[in-house]
Image (tube, rainbow, N blue to C red):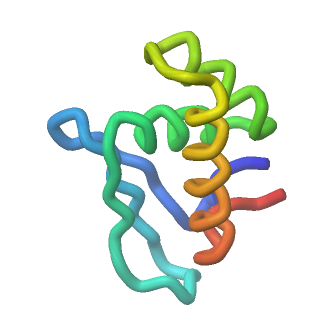
Amino acid sequence: MKLNECFIPHQIDGQAVIVPVAGTEFHGLIQGNKTLSVIAECLTRDVTEEEIVDVLCERFDGDREVIRADVAAAITRLKEIGAIDE
């Protein structure tokens, strides 16, 4: 999966912002914390959900199952708004 080319990830003061551009039905901003920032960074290339979990586990000290659940929730939300291409 990969971030749809109609969504552009940015970082502002360590916070993730994903901005939709022309061609999307979603009108708004997606804001998140450092976790979403890493997820968005990973999604700039073709990646699996498990690979994203691996990257987050390397960067943050946390329980793998909690990280996996957070990634799944973020991916689900991004899919709902059409921000992810499978």
On screen, residue 59 versus residue 24, left or right, reads left
Q: Is residue 28 left or right of residue 7?
A: left
**Height in image: 81 above or below 14?**
below
- Residue at 84 percent across and 57 percent down: it is 86
Q: Residue at x 49, y 20 (%)?
A: 62
- Find residue 33 and report its horizontal and vertical position in percent: 32, 43
Q: Quadrant of residue 31?
A: bottom left
User: Percent x, y for residue 59?
Assistant: 47, 14
The residue furthest bottom is: 25
In the image, is 82 to the left or to the right of 1?
left
Question: What is the quadrant of residue 34 in the picture?
Answer: top left
Q: Give the residue at x 67% y 50%.
A: 72
Image location of residue 61, percent across then percent down: 45, 14
Residue lying farthest to the left in this orientation: 13
Q: How many marks?
A: 0
Which of 74/21 is in front? 74
Say which of 35 and 68 sits in front. 68
Q: Position of residue 25 (x, y in %)?
A: 55, 88
